[in-house]
Amino acid sequence: MTVRRIELQHPVDLRRTIFPLIRGTGDPTARVEGGTVWRAVRTPDGPATMKLRQSAISTIEAEAWGPGAECAVAVDAPGAVGSFDDTTSFVARDPMVALAWVAAVLEQKVMGTEARTAWRRVVQMTADEAPGDHGLRLPPDAERVASLPPSELTRLGVTGTRAATLREVARHPKKIAALAGAPFNEARSWLRRLPGVGPWTEAEVARLALGDPDAVSVGDFHLPNIVAWALAGETRGTDDRMLELLEPYRGQRGRVQLLLEASGITAPRFGPKLERRTFF
C-alpha cells in the first residue's frame, strides 16, 4: 500500500469534486462511503485502486494498492481533487482519453439510467478486478470494448450509432491517446471528424479528459433546463438560451456547467416519465 497526504491551497468538497467521474451509484469502478471515495484506475505503470478520504477542509488522505499505486497517489489522486488546477487557465488533463470516450459514447442519446446500466454491464464483461480486495473493477479497456461483436454490444445495451462509434476507438488508439497532449482546438477538431461524434460527445470528452474548461454539452436533454432555471428562473431552456446565459462565463463555461450539475439544482418536471428500454 502507498500513502500520501494531499494539502490543497483551497477548500474542496471531495464527493462533489469526484461526482462527474462516477457513472451512477452502481458504477463497478468506484464507490462512495460517507466521506470516503474508492476508485479503480489505469495508470501508465499499471492498474491501481485508490482510497480518498477528506480529513480537513483542504486536506485529502490518499491510499493506493497495485502496480500503479505510486502513480495513483502522485498523479491520479491529486489530479482528481484539483491539486494541479491553475484557475487562471485551468489546464487539467486526464491521459486516459479513451476511457472518457467509452463513457461518453455509452451516454449518447439515451436516458441516464440506461447509460449507467450499459456502463455497468460493459465493465463487468470486459474489465478485470482492481488490485486489492476492495470489490472494484478496473475501467474497461477501450480497444477490448470496441472489439466486441455487434451482437454482444446489443446484449449489453449498446446499439446502432453508439456501437459503431465505439469501434472507432479500436481504429485510432494511438491518436486518441495523443489527444491528451494536444491543444484543445486541435483535439476537438479531430474528434468532430469521427463518425458518430456530435457536439455533445465532443464536449464530454473535451471537458472530462482533455480538461477544456469551456466545453459545454450542447444537445443534452436536461442541461438547458438546469441552466435556465438556475441562472434565469425559467422552467425550460434550449441550447441557444443556455449558451446565452453562460456567455458571461466564456472561457469557464464547462466548469460552470459542472458546478450547476453538482449543486443538485433541478428544473420543475412536467409530463410523463420516460420508460426505460430493455435489450433481452
Image: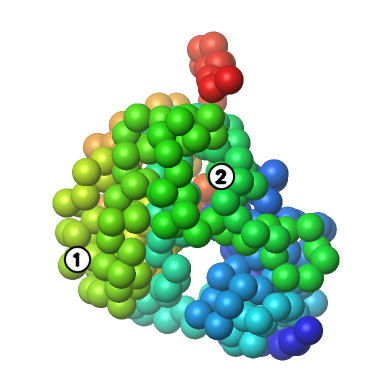
Q: Residue at x 56, y 70 (%)?
A: 42
Q: Is residue 197 left or right of residue 141?
A: left
Q: Residue at x 47, y 54 (%)?
A: 144
Q: Residue 182 location in percent, x, y?
A: 25, 74
Q: Mark 2 or mark 1: which comes first in sequence?
A: 2
Q: Is residue 113 above or below residue 132?
A: above
Task: Indicate the quadrant containing the N terminus: top left, top right, bottom left or bottom right.
Answer: bottom right
Q: Nearer the viewer, mark 2 or mark 1?
A: 2
Residue type, numbered disc 1: Asn
Is residue 212 among what the camera can see? no
Q: Is residue 169 above or below residue 70?
A: above
Please name the residue that numbered disc 2 is placed on.
122
Q: Is residue 4 left or right of residue 218?
A: right
Residue type, numbered disc 2: Val
Number of on-image labels: 2
Q: Quadrant of residue 172?
A: bottom left
Q: Residue at x 69, y 44 (%)?
A: 26
Q: Secondary structure at mark 1?
A: helix
Q: Secondary structure at mark 2?
A: helix
* Residue 276 numbered mark, or none: none
Is residue 63 among what the camera can see? yes
Please name the residue that numbered disc 1 is placed on.
185
Q: Quadrant of residue 47?
A: bottom right
Residue 242 vs residue 201, the one in the foreground: 201
Task: Name the residue at the top extreme.
Answer: 272
Q: Residue 147 location in percent, x, y?
A: 41, 49
Q: Is residue 274 above or below residue 248?
A: above
Q: Residue 132 location in percent, x, y?
A: 78, 70
Task: Indicate the quadrant containing the C terminus: top left, top right, bottom left or bottom right.
Answer: top right
Q: Residue at x 50, y 35 (%)?
A: 152
Residue 112 vs residue 85, the one in the foreground: 112
